[in-house]
Amino acid sequence: MEYGAIDLHKKESQVRIIDQSGAIIDRRITTTRERLTTVFWGRPRTRILVEASTESEWVAQHLESLGHEVIVADPNVGAMYASRGRRIKTDRRDAAVLAVACQQGHYRTVHRRSARQRIVQSMLRVRRELIESRTRAISLARAITRAGGLRIRGGRTEIFLDRLGALELPETMHATLVPLRSTIEVLNQELATADERFTTLVADDPVATRLMTMPGVGPITASAFVAALDDATRFESAAQVTSYLGLVPREYSSGERQHRGRVLRSAIRRCNRSSFRRHGA
């Protein structure tokens, strides 16, 4: 079997192939399907190592369609870079190190989500961006009205425009807020459409439907949880799931004293990225 590695980048990537005779082939290519096909089409079955990144999934799928074996590896594993020098770092050297790691098995594979859950993750990211955009627009509207000595009463985010419309605004302030009103209205419509899509989506997912039987769990939370875990059978226990999600407490223990605190901030950020938080303004 031949071995290879790709140091992936957004525009250009470095390729190294070690053929069956031990000869080395290096290529600098643009990161496109056409160039990958040019390099790997017709070659003997090759085991190719790539680091997990934004581009890694589509690259892996394309190389697999050409008949090769692709390993998507965790870039945080130090053993994978054991042969790399610390003083000089180039893409060519990185590709060479990855090729050696591929050949010797010094890597740890990462879980590749199913096609369905990748789509759900993308939908969740789009929805989060819509919510954050609406939150920023509402915060700006609040700041403008406060600067004019006016206060918008509290309430649900979905009816913010009604609460804003209840104020008697000066003509100049009203004209200033027109673009924000239009933006918030469009975002409300897009978010309503997105929520309807998630409601339809979870109807076909028995796992998400079961999660929604728990109090306080709706289509968004259920979809986010299922997408984060994808294949739950890869975890041996609930403790592994909490560790994977980063839901671990702070700990400061020494000797016979053990003290645990709140959930780590890194865990909270990870949950936020998975869309497990409530949004509002």
Image (tube, rainbow, N blue to C red):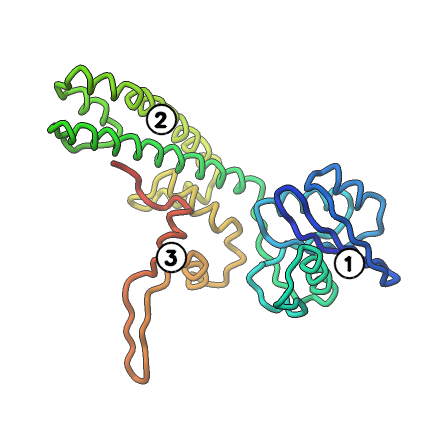
Give the quadrant of residue 149. Answer: top left
Circle on res. 187: 2
Residue that badge 1 annotates: 3
Q: Is residue 76 left or right of residue 45?
A: left
Which amino acid does the dot numbered 1 rest on? Tyr
Image quadrant where residue 217 sits: top left
**Label 1: few (<14), some or many (≥20) within 10 Å?**
many
Marks 3 and 2, how far apart at CA: 29 Å
- Disc 2 residue type (three-letter): Leu
Residue 3 image position (x, y, % from top left): 77, 58
Is residue 80 in view? no
Q: Are marks 3 and 1 in contact (CB under 8 Å)?
A: no
**Along the line of sight, the residue nearer the viewer: 127 or 27:** 27
Q: Tell me the CA gap for discs 2 and 1.
A: 49 Å
Residue on which the image places disc 3: 267
Q: Secondary structure at mark 2?
A: helix
Q: Residue at x 31, y 74 (%)?
A: 252
Between residue 162 and residue 27, name the one nearer to us. Answer: 27
Sequence-first disc among 3 and 1: 1
Q: CA distance from mark 3 to mark 1?
A: 37 Å
Task: Where is residue 89? Give x, y as percent.
Answer: 64, 61
| Label 3: which secondary element | helix
Q: Residue 277 location in percent, x, y?
A: 33, 45
Numbered badge on residue 189: none
Q: Is residue 77 left or right of residue 181?
A: right
Figure check: 239 above or below 130: below
Of label 2 and label 1, which has the lower sequence position?
1
Residue that sits furthest to the top in the current view: 171
